[in-house]
Image (tube, rainbow, N blue to C red):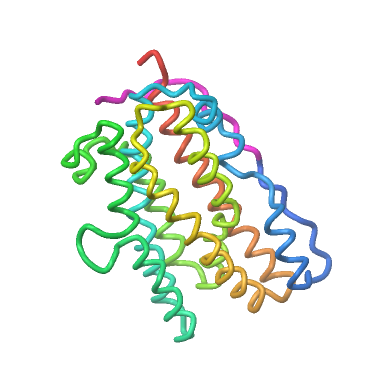
């Protein structure tokens, strides 16, 4: 499996529409505004449209799953960065579960392992998934930017960036619905990662939202929360945009 980045115009991302804040939002209104935040990368990006319409080739699927592993692997690292900056032991205790979800409690467990198994099911050998030989340099840089964001920003703002999980159940359900219909060559057990996230993501959302609602009570802190979420949405758009352009068909 090889990839060549083509010199072509990248897809134009929808710009997240920042709410006008003349006064702090109530906790309920803040949640509503966060859930309605525009610029959701997976809904509008052409690559995902092709995916859900059954128009991806096996090569494009392989490129996506091999590169996306780089993102899966930075998630527990950004969670560790949030923990290192968080002074609240109660928050740290609960946030630890996210690292366990991705890393497992021993080898062969966790969401990262499930993602590797997805790659194997799509035809990428385990060795090639594990050593990340197909990860594009731009993808790696984009993923590392998320870790750096969570290391360098106040921990509540880093928590706000994780609220893309607000939109995650929809995309995971879309994949569970569309993959068996359009790509019958993908074995059912390959979808275990998406099934696990249908349970984990809503739990993570409840915790992350509660933190943001508790700590973001001024115009300035709420604005920073929206800016953090906008950063994450644009980061994810950039990630899928690089993959989309690297694996265009014909190759």
Q: Quadrant of the N terminus?
A: top left
Does residue 161 appear left or right of residue 104 in this picture? right
- Quadrant in the rendering for residue 53: top right
In depth, the one of 218 and 162 nearer the eye is: 162
Magenta region includes residue 97: no
Q: x, y (%) of residue 140?
A: 34, 45
Residue at x-position 39% and y-position 74%: 96
Instruction: Give the vertical position of 138 relative to 26 (above or below).
Output: above
Instruction: Give the vertical position of 109 relative to 233 (above or below).
Output: below
State the predominant SS element of the stretch in magenta: loop
Q: x, y (%) of residue 132?
A: 24, 42
Residue at x-position 33% and y-position 24%: 59
In depth, the one of 120 and 162 nearer the eye is: 120
- Quadrant in the rendering for residue 57: top left
Residue at x-position 39% and y-position 69%: 81
Residue interval drawn in magenta: 1-14
Q: x, y (%) of residue 156?
A: 55, 72
């Amino acid at each position: 499996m090889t990839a060549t980045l083509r010199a072509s115009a990248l897809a134009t991302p929808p710009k997240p529409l920042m709410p006008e804040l003349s006064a702090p939002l109530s906790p309920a209104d803040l949640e509503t505004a966060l859930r309605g935040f525009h610029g959701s990368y997976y809904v509008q990006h052409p690559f995902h449209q092709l995916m859900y319409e059954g128009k991806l080739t096996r090569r494009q699927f392989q490129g996506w799953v091999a590169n996306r592993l780089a993102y899966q692997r930075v998630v527990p690292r950004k969670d560790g960065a949030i923990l290192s900056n968080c002074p609240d032991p109660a928050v740290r205790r609960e946030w630890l579960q996210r690292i366990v979800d991705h890393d497992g409690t021993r080898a062969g467990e966790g969401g990262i392992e499930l993602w590797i198994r997805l790659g194997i099911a799509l035809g990428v050998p385990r060795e090639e998934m594990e050593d990340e030989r197909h990860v594009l340099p731009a993808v790696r840089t984009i993923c590392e930017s998320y870790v750096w964001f969570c290391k360098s920003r106040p921990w509540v703002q880093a928590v706000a960036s994780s609220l893309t999980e607000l939109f995650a159940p929809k995309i995971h359900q879309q994949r569970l619905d569309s993959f068996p219909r359009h790509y019958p060559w993908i074995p059912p057990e390959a979808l275990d990662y998406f099934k696990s996230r249908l349970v984990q993501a809503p739990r993570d959302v409840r915790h992350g939202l509660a933190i943001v609602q508790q700590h973001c009570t001024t115009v300035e802190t709420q604005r920073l929360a929206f800016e953090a979420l906008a950063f994450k949405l644009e980061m994810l758009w950039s990630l899928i945009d690089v993959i989309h352009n690297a694996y265009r068909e014909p190759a």
